Image: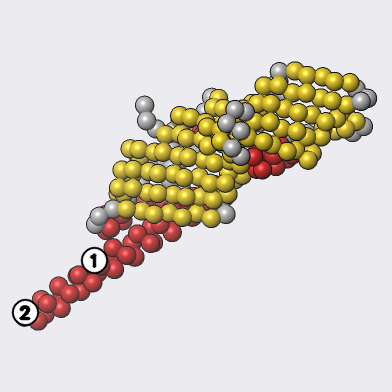
Amino acid sequence: MARRLGIIGGIIILFLIFGQILIPKTVSNVINKSIVTLTNAEKVDVEVKKDPALLMLTGQFDDIVIKAERAKTDKVVFDQFDINLHNVRIDMGELMKTYQLGNASIEDVVLRAYVSQAELAHAINQSVKGAKDAKVEITPEQVKVSSVLNIGGLINAEIRLEGTIASEAGKIVFKTEKFYIDNGMIGNFSGKLFTDLVLLDLKQLPFNVEVKSVVLEQGRAVIVADNHP
């Protein structure tokens, strides 16, 4: 009898040990797929935390830490998304079925998104009609853009833009504050507004966050958003 109880106890212990290892790995893989679907990222790493790990099967998590590299939106590729979720409740049935976090209850969300000047230049080339060979310089003071703009299919004009990256109505936008056109055939022109380019719409994310800061650094912009009041 004692031997039988010992065997049963050993099986339970082994089950708990394997559960602590296998359950987080399995759940991380499922959440990984949901983030890949959401961001079209080239690489996603997910770490989930809950003790005991068995509670993850009921959708309870203390922390979910997500790193998504080269996450894509309609207009731009972000070098990295860092997403930290704390005190999370997920409908595991829905997650397993749809690979979506839309019904998650999250107490604390912090998101950091990083976009480089090279990716912003690529987005301008793709999004601004007639623009080509755009070059972008991001400094702590502003964003500078130089490009060649084809006008009417007949004239190529050199343009220079000065602007910033800011939050506007739940969106991250590259806002042009000044533009200059210089071409020998059409003369020189300048103005205050050329075009705005939406980089990220926060409403498309599966959690409700607001932008807290957009910081321009040398060579990149860092966007920080959270759900803190």
Picture coordinates of residue 82, whole percent (x, y): 46, 45
Camera-side residue: 26 or 181?
181
Q: Which mark is residue 16?
A: 1
Q: Which mark is residue 134?
A: none
Element under disc 1 = helix
Picture coordinates of residue 210, whole percent (x, y): 45, 30
Q: CA distance from mark 2 to mark 1?
A: 21 Å
**Residue drawn at point x = 59 percent, y = 37 percent:** 218
Q: Amino acid at mark 2?
A: Ala
Element under disc 2 = helix
Residue 87 lies in what quarter of the image?
Answer: top left
Q: Is residue 210 above or below residue 205?
A: above
In the displayed orientation, state which residue is furthest to the left. 1
> Looking at the rendering, in which quadrant would you find the N terminus?
bottom left
Q: Amino acid at mark 1?
A: Leu
Q: What residue does disc 2 label?
A: 2
**Residue drawn at point x = 41 percent, y = 38 percent:** 110
Residue 159 lies in what quarter of the image?
Answer: top right
Residue 14 lies in what quarter of the image?
Answer: bottom left
Label 1 Cα crowd, 10 Å radius (few <14 / some 14-19 / many 20+):
some
**Residue drawn at point x = 54 percent, y = 41 percent:** 114
